């Protein structure tokens, strides 16, 4: 008898033993384990972000922003239109439209030449 005839259903066979609440809790635990903590940047790194943002705005260049959103990193390809120092946010234009990004949500800035 060959092992090629065996059809294993994988985890499907075990879900019958798990209540829906347990399945949802297991999925939520996996999502929580993937989350990252917001790093704390020193003044030099913040200054570098500000210089890159101003440079991209002055020369109308695209920027690849890495943003912190609910424990996950979100990438945003955009063009910077204005910088609001008072509100501590930047106005960006993406494919979806205009968005406002707060300074404290920025993880990384990459200018695309």
Image (cartoon, helix red, strand yellow):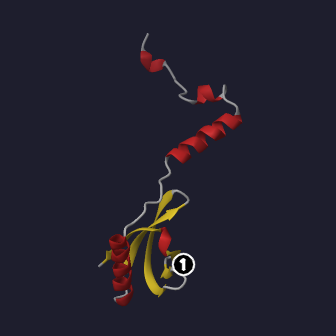
**9 left or right of 62?**
right
Q: What element carries label 1?
A: strand
Q: Which residue is drawn at 59% across and 30% down?
A: 12
In the displayed orientation, state which residue is furthest to the front.
43
**44 left or right of 103?**
left
Question: Is 9 located above or below residue 62 in the figure?
Answer: above
Q: Which residue is drawn at 55% across and 47% down?
A: 32
Image quarter where the N terminus lies is top left
Of 16 and 45, nearer the camera is 45
Of 4 and 18, nearer the camera is 18
Q: Mark 1 points at which residue?
A: 100
Question: Is 22 located above or below residue 93 in the figure?
Answer: above
- Tally of numbered tags: 1
Q: Can residue 50 be seen in this view?
A: yes
Image quarter where the C terminus lies is bottom left
**Residue 66 location in percent, x, y?**
43, 66
**Residue 112 location in percent, x, y?**
32, 76
Of 8 and 91, nearer the camera is 91
Of 41 and 49, nearer the camera is 41
Q: Quadrant of the rendered structure where residue 51 is? A: bottom left
**Residue 36 location in percent, x, y?**
47, 53
**37 left or right of 62?**
right
In the displayed orientation, state which residue is furthest to the left.
113
Q: Residue at x 60, y 38 (%)?
A: 26
Q: How crowded is mark 1: few (under 14 residues within 10 Å), some or many (20 or more)?
A: some
Q: Can residue 110 be seen in this view?
A: no
**23 left or right of 52?**
right
In the displayed orientation, state which residue is furthest to the bottom.
58
**Residue 23 location in percent, x, y?**
64, 36
């Amino acid at each position: 008898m060959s092992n090629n005839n065996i059809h294993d259903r994988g985890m499907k066979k075990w879900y019958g033993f798990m209540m829906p609440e347990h399945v949802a809790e297991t999925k939520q635990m996996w999502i929580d384990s993937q989350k990252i903590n917001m790093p704390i940047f020193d003044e030099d790194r913040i200054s570098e972000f500000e210089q890159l943002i101003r440079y991209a705005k002055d020369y109308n260049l695209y920027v690849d922003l890495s943003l912190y959103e609910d424990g996950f990193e979100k990438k945003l390809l955009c063009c910077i239109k204005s910088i609001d120092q008072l509100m501590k946010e930047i106005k960006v234009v993406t494919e979806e439209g205009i968005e406002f990004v707060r300074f404290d949500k920025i993880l990384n800035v990459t200018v695309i030449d």
